[in-house]
Amino acid sequence: MHMITRDDGEGVVITMPDGTEVRITVLDGANVCLGVDAPKAARVERTEVEASRLRHPSQPRLRAL
């Protein structure tokens, strides 16, 4: 299980092997801790990591959270 802490305006994106995306965004709260239990084939990333990966696709890929 991945434990991810997020603040206001931050989020998480979960990409399933078929390309389906689930996006979670913190709208109101000082700090939120999410527990994500997903199949190994699903990519779970903080939204800022996903945005960086999309801006720089030639960068070597790190293992997702």
Image (cartoon, grey):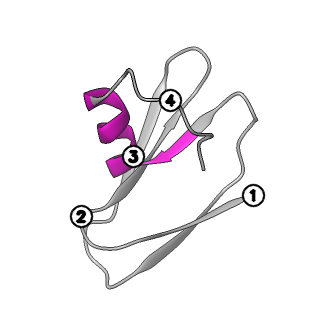
Tag 3 residue: 49
**Location of mark 1 (residue):** 1
Q: Give the left or right position of residue 1, taking residue 7 as reference.
A: right
Q: Earlier in the sequence, mark 4 or mark 2?
A: 2
- Please, is residue 47 above or below residue 3 in the view? above
Q: Are marks 4 and 1 in contact (CB under 8 Å)?
A: no
User: Residue at coordinates 59% horizontally, 35% vertically from top-left?
Assistant: 43
Classified by dominant secondary structure, the portion drawn in magenta counts as helix
Q: Amino acid at mark 4?
A: Pro
| Amino acid on which the number 1 mark rests in the picture | Met
Q: Toward which corner of the image does residue 57 lie, by quadrant? A: top left
Real-space CA distance between mark 3 and mark 2, rounded to the nearest whole angstrom? 14 Å
Quarter residue 55 falls in: top left
The label shown at residue 9 is 2
| Rendered residue at 32%/85% (across/down) | 30
| Foreground disc of the pair 4, 2 | 4
First in sequence: mark 4 vs mark 1: 1
Q: Amino acid at mark 2?
A: Gly
Distance (Cα) linking label 4 and label 1 = 24 Å
SS at mark 1 in the image: loop
In the rendered image, residue 2, in percent from the top left (x then y), is placed at 67, 58
Give yes or no for contact between labels 3 and 4 (Cβ–Cβ under 8 Å).
no
Instruction: Specify which label sits upstream in the sequence, 1 or 2.
Output: 1
Question: In the image, which residues are magenta?
Answer: 44-55
Mark 1 vs mark 3: give the one in front.
3
Q: Which structural element holds mark 4?
A: loop
Q: Nearer the viewer, residue 13 or 56?
A: 56
What residue sits 32% from the left and 65% below the top?
A: 26
Q: Earlier in the sequence, mark 3 or mark 2?
A: 2
Compute the Cα span from label 1 to label 2.
Answer: 23 Å
Q: CA distance from mark 4 to mark 2?
A: 27 Å
Of circles 4 and 1, the one toward us is 4
